[in-house]
Image (cartoon, grey):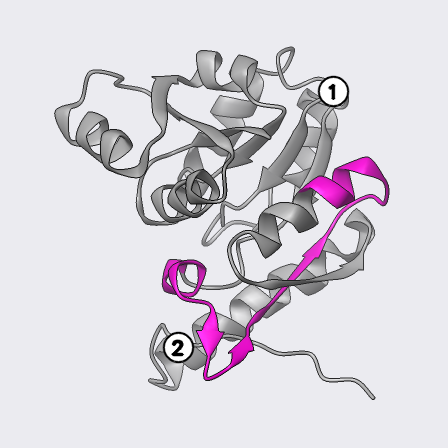
């Protein structure tokens, strides 16, 4: 699978590394392509680096792992290129009216197939998702169909078990889980190596 990862910080670099090791072709999309640290990181992970526009053109899946306050500008600037792409919104707009960017995608890039995933756990859990012998769950939402299959493949390739909450009408529940993670990890001092498991009989 060809994957564009917009952003090369903790979340983006961890996901990119996991997917590259799983055999996917990954390109970072960054503002400054010739940044020496980004180039060294990309070489270490076995991924390529391009501009945001180049990465979006490259990827069948586009993962937004950029700061939440940069989401609107980025979506607007690349609205046409996002049409028909599988988009994963992993960015949290901290302090905003909503943590997600679903409204911006709906108005600016209505042709994109949008999923909300990789926003409710710390990046440490993407790097090491196994607790004892048990993989952590990643709850996500988005439309059923081919996009769902691709997103669940990428979740599994990080070692997590995908749990679909529903379509994008359930995005608030996924974001509430992110809020719960922050409350436990920081408010209750449980630390960032904290994840969730759905148990059923």
Q: Is residue 137 magenta?
A: yes
Q: Is residue 182 above or below residue 103?
A: below
Q: Which residues are magenta?
A: 123-150
Mark toward the start of the polypeptide (1 vs 2): 1
**Picture coordinates of residue 23 (x, y %)?**
50, 37
In this figure, which residue is indicated by the disc labeled 1?
84
User: Across the whole image, how many numbered discs are drawn on residues?
Assistant: 2
Q: Quadrant of residue 162?
A: bottom right
Tell me, yes or no, if residue 2 can be seen here: yes
Q: State the SS at label 1.
A: loop
Instruction: Please tell me which residue is depicted at 38% across the width and 59% down the height of the picture.
Output: 127
Image quadrant in which the C terminus is located: bottom right
**Picture coordinates of residue 37 (x, y %)?**
15, 31
| Closest to the observer, 118 or 46 | 46
Q: Is residue 54 magenta?
A: no
The local crowd at label 2, few if under 14, some if 14 to 19, many if 20 or more residues have their Cα within 10 Å, is some
In this figure, which residue is indicated by the disc labeled 2?
185
Image quadrant in which the N terminus is located: top right
**Picture coordinates of residue 31 (x, y %)?**
32, 20
| Closest to the observer, 29 or 105 | 29
């Amino acid at each position: 699978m060809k994957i564009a990862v917009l952003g090369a910080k903790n979340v983006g670099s961890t996901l990119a590394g996991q997917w590259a090791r799983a055999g996917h072709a990954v390109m970072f999309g960054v503002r400054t392509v010739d940044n020496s640290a980004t180039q060294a990181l990309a070489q270490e992970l076995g991924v390529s680096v391009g501009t945001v526009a180049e990465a979006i053109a490259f990827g069948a899946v586009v993962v937004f792992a950029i700061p939440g306050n940069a989401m609107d500008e980025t979506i607007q600037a690349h609205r046409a290129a996002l049409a028909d792409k599988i988009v994963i919104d992993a960015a949290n707009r901290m302090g905003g009216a909503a943590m997600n960017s679903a409204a911006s995608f709906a108005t600016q890039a209505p042709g994109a197939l949008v999923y909300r995933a990789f926003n409710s756990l710390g990046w440490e859990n993407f790097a090491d998702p196994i607790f004892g012998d048990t993989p952590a769950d990643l709850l996500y939402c988005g439309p059923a169909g081919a996009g769902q299959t691709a997103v669940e493949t990428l979740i599994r390739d990080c070692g997590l078990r995908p749990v679909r909450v529903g379509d994008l009408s359930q995005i608030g529940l996924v974001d509430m889980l992110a809020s719960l993670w922050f409350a436990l990890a920081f408010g209750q001092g449980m630390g960032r190596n904290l994840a969730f498991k759905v148990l059923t009989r």
